[in-house]
Image (cartoon, rainbow, N blue to C red):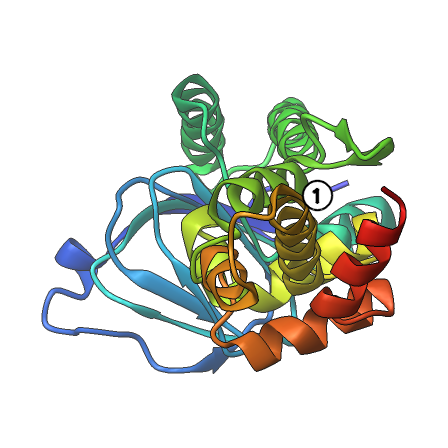
Amino acid sequence: MLQRGNDIYCGIFDSGILRREDSKSTDRRVIFYELELFHTNTGTSFVNGERYPCRRGMLLCAKPGQVRHSDFPVRCSFIRIAAGKDPDIDRILDAAPNCFYIRDESKILELMALFGKLGTLSVGSETRGWETAHINAKFAEMLYRCMRLWGEDVSAVDGAPVGRLTREAYEYINEHYCEPCTLADIALALHISPNYLHTVFKKETGTTPLAHVLHRRVEKAKKLIVAGEHSMLEIAMETGFSSQSHFNKVFKKETGQTPVGWRRDLAKTY
C-alpha cells in the first residue's frame, strides 16, 4: 500500500495564485501518476500532444513517461501517486483514460470532498500506522469512485454493450449526421480528444465514428430515394454530403450499387 508523504502527495493547484505571471506551463515528462479534478471551465491541458479543454468535473489521469503542459488559467485538486509501490494501483491507473468529463454535479462535489479529505490527512510530517491506514482507506475509496465513473452507465447500442462516451457519440451523430459532422466536431461536443474518441468508439462498436456518420447518411438517402420526391443532387445535399460524386462513392461502397442503380433495382420490385 501507499505510505504517507513518500508515495502520495495531495493539494490544490491554482495558476492564478501560484503562476499568475505565466500564461502556460512548460512541457515536462510525468514521473508520478497525476490524478487531477478540475474546478472551473478555464484553461487547456495537453498530454502527449492531445488537447483537453478544461471543464468543471474534468478528471485527468497522466501516467509516468507521458509529456504534458497546461495553458492557464487552471484550478484543480490533485493527487500525485508514486509508481511501482502497488501493482494493483498501477494497473488501475495505467488503464484509466487520460481524460474523463464528469457530468453529474453531485458526483463532482463528492469527488472534490474526497480529494480535499486526502489533502487534509496528508498534511504534517509524522507518520503513524493508523494515519497511513486512514489515508490508504480514503485513497481506495476515491480510486473506487473514479473507476466507477470511468466505466459507469454502460448501456447497449445496436444490441452491443457500450460505455457512456460511445453512447453519447451515437446520440450526437444521430442528431447531426445530416450536417457537417467530422470526428473533431463530435469530439468537441463531448469535450474529449478526437483520437481517444476514435479508439474507444471503434473498440466498442467495431467501426469508427465517421463510418457511422456515413452509414446513417446512406440509410437516410435510401428513404429519400424511396419517397421519389428529390433529385440525386438534392438527396446528396440533404443528407450532408459535400457533392453528388462523394455521395455516389459512399453509397456504392455501402450498398454495392450507385444510387441510380439502387433506385432502378428498387423499381423492379414493384
Which residue occupies 60% across, 25% down? 138
**Quadrant of the drawing holding the C terminus:** top right
Question: Most extreme residue toward the left, as rendered?
Answer: 21
Q: Is residue 99 left or right of residue 12?
A: right
Q: Is residue 12 above or below residue 26?
A: above
Which residue occupies 60% across, 71% down? 31
**Quadrant of the drawing holding the N terminus:** top right
Q: Position of residue 32 (x, y in %)?
A: 60, 63
Residue 89 can be seen in this image: yes
Which residue occupies 66% across, 22% down? 130
Residue 84 can be seen in this image: no
Mark 1 is on which residue type? Answer: Leu
Q: Is residue 249 above or below residue 42?
A: below
Where residue 263 sits, quadrant-wise, is bottom right
Which residue occupies 27% across, 59% down? 43
Q: Nearer the viewer, residue 262 or 159?
A: 262
Q: Position of residue 110 (x, y in %)?
A: 46, 20
- Callout 1 environment at 10 Å: few (<14), some (14 to 19), or many (20+)? some
Secondary structure category for the residue under label 1: loop
Q: Position of residue 29 (x, y in %)?
A: 54, 79
Q: Is residue 155 above or below residue 45?
A: above
Q: Residue at label 1?
A: 2
Q: Nearer the viewer, residue 109 or 205?
A: 205
Count all numbered tags in the image, as a single digit. Answer: 1
Q: Nearer the viewer, residue 112 or 259?
A: 259
